[in-house]
C-alpha cells in the first residue's frame, strides 16, 4: 500500500498551488528528526535543499534514527513541494542532569505559514527516561522548552502557525500550543499530534488545554499504544498501518490514499493494552511510579551507555551488568520492583 514516499512522488506540487494537508503534516513532523546539527547557523534561514547539501558536505546524512530517513531527506530536498521551504531555529538539547531531551525546527512554507516541528524521542537513554517521567509528572523539562520555543518563533515571525510532532513531539506540540502566550495562540491555525501520548488529569482539565482543543488533530494507528497513553480529550482519527502492534508507531508504515490517511477502526488488542496500562496507572501511585522508573534507569545507567544503539551493540555484557546491579539493590527495593512489574503483568 502507498505511504509518504508514494505521496511525494504523486503530489510534488507547490504548496502555493495545492494547500497543506494531513500527510504534509506527517512529513514535516519527521523533518525534526533529521541530522541538522552543525548545518543551520543561529538565526540563519536556508532552504531545505541547501541544508541537505550542507549535510552531505559534513558527511552526516547517515546519522539518522531510521533507515527510511536517509531516503526521505534527499527526496524532500529535491522536491518542488518542500525543497525551497526555509528551515531555521534548529535546536537539539540533551541535558542528562535535568533528564531532558528536546529538539525542534521551524519550517517557513511557501503559503506564508510556519510549521513548528517538535522531535519525539530519539535514541538517547535520557530521552527515554524523560518519556517515562511523564507517567508521574505533570510537567517535564522538554514541555517547558517547547512553550518557550513556540513563543520565540511567534515573536520573531508574523506568519500563521501550524504546530506538530510525532510521538513525544506530538505531546510537545499540544502542550506548547496550550500553554503559550495569548498572542502566540491567536496565530495558531492547526495543531498536529501524530501518535503522541496524552497528559495528566491536571493538564487536561486546565483551561489552557481546553482552549486549544478545537484546533488539535490527533492521528493514531489502529493498534496504537504510545498514542493512547495517559489522558486525551481531543477528537482522534484512526489510520491504517502496514505493521502490527507497537511497530505501527513507525510513521513510515501509515497508509496513504491521495492526500489523506486511510482510515481504520480501533482494534481489540489496542483496547486491551490501553485498559491494562490505565488500570496499572490507577493501582500504582505517582510516587511509586517515580521510584520504580528511577530505580529501573539507575540499573540501566550502570552499563554506562548513552544511547539505545550502544546498549544493543554489547547486549550480553550490558544485561549482565544490569543483573549484577539489580542483585545489589536492597531487599526492599527489589520487592518494590517485583511488585510493580507484577501489577502490570
Image (tube, rainbow, N blue to C red):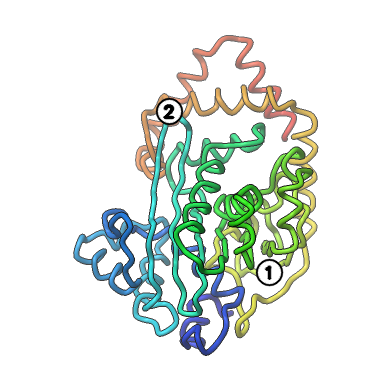
For label 1, the crowd category at 10 Å Cα-Cα, with few meaning under 14, some 14 to 19 and many 20 or more, is: many
Task: Name the quarter where the C terminus is drawn.
Answer: top right
**Which residue is label 1 attached to?**
239
* Front one among 197 and 243: 197
Residue 22: name its quadrant: bottom right
User: In the drawing, does residue 330 fall left or right of residue 126?
Assistant: right
Which residue is drawn at the image coordinates 55% and 76% (left, top)? 3
Which residue is drawn at the image coordinates 32% and 74% (left, top)? 49
Residue 305: name its quadrant: top left
- Residue 145's place in the image compared with 23, above or below, is above
Measure the C-alpha gap from mark 1 to mark 2.
Answer: 38 Å
For label 2, the crowd category at 10 Å Cα-Cα, with few meaning under 14, some 14 to 19 and many 20 or more, is: few
* Front one among 220 and 336: 220
Task: Where is residue 67? Give x, y as percent.
Answer: 40, 63
**Which residue is label 2 attached to?**
97
Which residue is drawn at the image coordinates 42% and 32% (left, top)? 96
Task: Where is residue 266? Give x, y as percent.
Answer: 77, 63
* Front one among 172 and 292: 172
Amino acid at each position: 500500500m502507498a505511504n509518504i514516499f508514494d505521496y511525494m512522488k504523486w503530489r510534488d506540487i507547490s504548496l502555493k498551488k495545492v494547500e497543506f494537508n494531513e500527510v504534509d503534516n506527517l512529513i514535516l513532523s519527521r523533518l525534526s528528526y533529521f541530522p541538522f546539527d552543525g548545518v543551520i547557523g543561529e538565526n540563519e534561514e536556508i532552504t531545505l535543499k541547501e541544508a541537505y547539501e550542507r549535510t552531505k558536505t559534513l558527511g552526516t546524512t547517515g546519522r539518522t534514527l531510521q533507515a527510511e530517513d536517509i531516503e526521505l531527506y534527499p527526496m524532500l530536498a529535491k522536491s518542488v513541494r518542500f525543497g525551497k521551504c526555509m528551515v531555521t531555529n534548529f535546536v537539539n538539547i540533551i541535558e542528562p542532569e535535568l533528564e531532558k531531551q528536546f529538539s525542534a525546527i521551524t519550517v517557513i512554507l511557501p503559503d506564508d505559514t510556519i510549521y513548528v516541528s517538535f522531535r519525539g524521542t530519539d535514541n538517547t537513554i535520557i530521552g527515554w527516561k524523560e518519556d517515562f517521567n511523564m507517567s508521574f509528572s505533570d510537567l517535564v523539562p522538554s514541555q517547558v522548552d517547547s512553550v518557550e520555543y513556540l513563543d520565540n518563533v511567534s515573536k520573531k515571525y508574523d506568519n500563521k502557525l501550524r504546530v506538530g510532532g510525532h510521538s513525544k513531539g506530538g505531546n510537545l506540540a499540544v502542550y506548547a500550543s496550550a500553554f503559550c502566550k495569548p498572542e502566540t495562540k491567536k496565530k495558531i491555525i492547526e495543531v498536529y499530534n501524530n501518535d503522541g501520548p496524552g497528559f495528566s488529569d491536571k493538564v487536561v482539565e486546565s483551561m489552557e488545554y481546553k482552549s486549544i482543543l478545537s484546533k488539535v488533530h490527533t492521528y493514531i494507528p489502529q493498534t496504537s499504544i504510545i498514542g493512547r497513553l495517559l489522558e486525551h480529550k481531543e477528537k482522534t482519527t484512526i489510520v491504517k498501518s502496514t505493521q502490527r502492534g507497537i511497530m505501527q508507531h513507525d510513521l513510515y508504515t501509515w497508509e496513504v490514499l491521495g492526500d489523506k490517511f486511510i482510515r481504520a477502526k480501533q482494534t481489540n488488542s489496542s483496547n486491551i493494552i490501553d485498559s491494562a496500562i490505565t488500570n496499572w496507572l490507577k493501582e500504582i501511585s505517582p510516587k511509586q511510579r517515580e521510584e520504580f522508573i528511577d530505580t529501573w534507569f539507575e540499573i540501566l545507567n550502570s552499563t554506562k551507555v548513552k544511547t539505545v544503539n550502544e546498549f544493543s551493540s554489547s547486549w550480553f555484557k550490558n544485561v549482565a551488568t544490569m543483573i549484577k546491579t539489580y542483585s545489589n539493590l536492597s531487599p526492599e527495593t527489589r520487592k518494590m520492583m517485583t511488585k510493580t512489574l507484577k501489577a502490570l503483568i
